Amino acid sequence: MSRITRDQITGMNFHYKHYPLEYFLDAMVRYEFKNIELWGASPHFYVEEMSLHDIRRVKKEIDRRDLSVVCFTPEQCVYPINLAAKEKRIRENSIQYFIKSAEAAKELEAPLMLVTPGWGYENEDRLEAWKRTIDSLERLTSVVAKLDVTLAFEPLTRVESNLVHDAKSLKAILDEVGSPYLKGMIDTIPMALANEDFLDYHNLLHDDLVHIHFIDGKPEGHLVWGDGVLPLQKYIDQLSEIGYKGFLTLEYTSYQYVQTPDAAIERSLEVLSSVIDR
């Protein structure tokens, strides 16, 4: 059985957003990360405000520290971004935003870019919003294919999306789009809220599972391991059982960590050290 290793654990800059990006990058070196997932939002890396020169400057800072970006995650949950939007202007703006983001991912040499399903109005036919998401994803995959960037599609919680919030709906959307440049990923919080685990996803997705946001919760929240109630040992055992070779990002979006982000990383690595291989 293949064990999860330390090199698969990936840092992310969300909970470092009250510090400069360079501070985050230095912290990743200090804590011996080799790979990062870059959250694309102000003040660190918001594509709508960046020139090509700005993007390449950030890439040089990343390279200078011998780090690699394994996934670029443009902010899409609090900004007006919605691939399923009924309003044509909003949906078109969302598509163009992701195209810009994919071009940035290419410059960062990130093999993956994270996308989410968006949502349809609760009082409209779900199928209509589903069709709009499919159309948006078909347009995006035709673009990212030329860039050789793969979309890692993340289910959201049912509160966040009425379209894709469990393994079955994720599998359905991957099958319907049918592009090798659209794959599935897991966030442990939506997974737990749907009463699912890694085996449920693996049994449906197999090799189409390419990325994981690996965090604790109650089960809500994106918490440091040990601050929530999720079954860490069970999850690690399942990932080892299925031979997962991708990355596991520590995505801490709870504001309780933004003042002392290093402490959050230190506590996570301490807890994880007992269940993963060095």
Image (cartoon, rainbow, N blue to C red):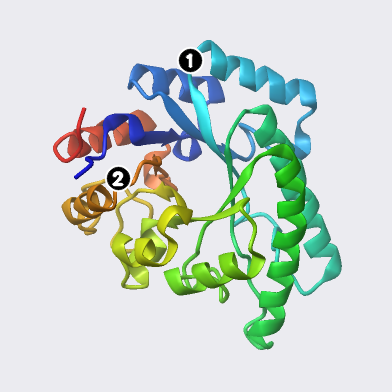
State the residue position of label 1.
Answer: 66
Residue drawn 70% across the image and 60% down it: 137
Which element is circle 2 on?
A: loop
Q: Position of residue 91 (x, y in %)?
A: 78, 63
Q: Please indicate whether residue 181 sits to the left or right of residue 90 in the image.
A: left
- Going by the numbered disc 1, the residue's amino acid type is Asp
Q: Position of residue 217 (x, y in %)?
A: 31, 57
Q: Position of residue 124 (x, y in %)?
A: 69, 87
Residue furthest top as drawn:
64
Q: Please indicate whether residue 193 sits to the left or right of residue 158 in the image.
A: left
Residue drawn 63% across the image and 28% down it: 108
Q: Which mark is residue 224?
A: 2
Given residues 119 and 135, the one toward you in this image is 135
Are circles 1 and 2 on residues that touch, CB within 8 Å?
no
- Going by the numbered disc 2, the residue's amino acid type is Val
Residue 194 in the image: above or below residue 237: below
Residue drawn 20% across the image and 57% down it: 231
Mark 1 / mark 2, whichever is N-terminal: 1
Residue drawn 40% across the image and 41% down it: 246
Question: CA separation, marks 1 and 2?
Answer: 25 Å
Mark 2 closeness class: few <14, some 14–19, many ≥20 residues within 10 Å: many
Q: Position of residue 161 (x, y in %)?
A: 56, 71
Residue 6 in the image: above or below residue 173: above
